[in-house]
Amino acid sequence: MIKAKKTEQDDTERDTKDLKQISGNLMEARSLSRIFLILALFWTIIITAVAGWSYRQAYTTALEIAIAGARDTFNRDLVYRRWATSHGGVYVPVTPVMKPNQYLNVPEREIATPSGKKLTLVNPAYMTRQVHELGQEEYGLWGHITSLKPIRPENTPDYWEKEALLAFERGKNEVSSLESSGKEAYLRLMRPLITEPACLKCHAVQGYKTGDIRGGISISVPWGPFKQGLIASRRTIVFAYGAMWAMGLIGLWFGWNRINDDMSKRKKMEEKIRNLSITDQLTGLNNRRGFLSLAEQQLKLSDRNKKSAVLFYADLDGLKQINDTFGHEHGDKAIIEAANVFRETFRSSDIIARLGGDEFAVLAVDTSEVNSFIFTERLKQLIDIRNNKECQIYKLSISMGYSCYDPENPCSIDDLMVWADRLMYEQKQKRREARGERRK
């Protein structure tokens, strides 16, 4: 039967009441803070990456719009040139602004109307140049018709245009990039001008043939308006993602604070837990006090998770005889050997204890009655292995009973111990009767 003094039982009951609200696995404050910092850092990295990606998308979109605008301007210029080329140029009145093109050497460059009004022939290149000048004046769009072999000195390419023209000769059909000109930035785009049959009227003397690249049109779109739009987008992105980041951190902080508050309540009892002696000094197992405390907490978890458990109650047979015959030193050794057998039999998650004297108890968590047979057989095998070793001056024998905990029909740890102790005692009696039969 359960051999425990009344005073020990009273102490156990008092300590158990003190420990009812203590979790078996207390979270460390530093570990919790570290987890919070890691999560906060991870959240910050995610928000920063997504915000950066969003801004990159806005920048790419602005760049694509600017490029599309430059392409439209180029295409319009090309349409104007083809229209003028298809008509052999156009005659316009000579004015201080519209002077005859000194680089155009064709018959009838200047003519007069019957009324005496002077007209000058405007070829496609001259027309394109004037359209570019008007566009720059009116809208800030800057265009430049250029070539590696320009007739007009003003059409000489700058460094960027020259590199683009050389790229066209290598097979590229468009060059674009953001460039600075003084304090202003421009999206520069350039496409080649392909020699068409109508172009040979003016450019055949330069050696061009139909299909040759004879130059290009460079378009410069002011980047300022797009930059202002990007600044506005950046503000929106910073505000939106900053708000998301802040809300995420606030959520993490509330979660951390809630857990920390709960942990703080448990920490108030931590000193008391440390002062309690819950370990058996001889075996290193839980003692009765520790076992009851941990077992009650485990049964609560079993109730919550609807997991069954099995309590084993065991006696080291013949301990008094070992003490009387070989001395208490061997008796202590037998207790330690029995403790090691229990450690090897059960899992690290199970609660193993020496209740006092020759009594042991184990609460196997998440275990059914069917699995209890496995533990019992393993215990027998380990004892047999120990007893079959040479130079054993005494045999180790353990009687064990068990009781099952059903979360659907909960009971106290004391009830489980009483039922398991009863079965253990019946097993011990059967062994005694069997030994008596052999003696006869």
Image (tube, helix red, strand yellow):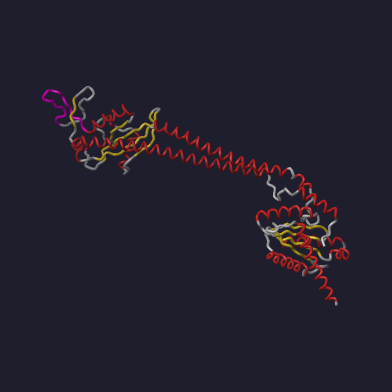
Image point (18%, 25%), residue name: 93
Indicate the position of residue 195 as horizontal and vertical percent values. 23, 40
**How many marks on residues?**
0
Image point (69%, 66%), residue name: 374
The image quadrant where one finds the N terminus is bottom right
Indicate the position of residue 314 as horizontal and vertical percent values. 78, 63
Indicate the position of residue 109 as horizontal and vertical percent values. 16, 29
Residue with the most extreme right position: 324
Q: Is residue 235 above or below residue 287?
A: above
Q: Is residue 125 magenta?
A: no
Q: Is residue 292 above or below residue 164?
A: below
Residue with the most extreme left position: 114
The image quadrant where one finds the C terminus is bottom right
Q: Is residue 287 above or below residue 82?
A: below
Observer-nearest of 108 and 118: 118
Q: Horizontal placement of 110 versus 236: left or right? A: left
Residue with the most extreme bottom position: 440
**In the rendered image, which quarter is residue 173 located in?**
top left
Indicate the position of residue 300 as horizontal and vertical percent values. 70, 53
Image point (16%, 27%), residue name: 110
Q: Is residue 117 magenta?
A: yes
First to last magenta residue range: 107-123
Observer-nearest of 388 and 353: 353
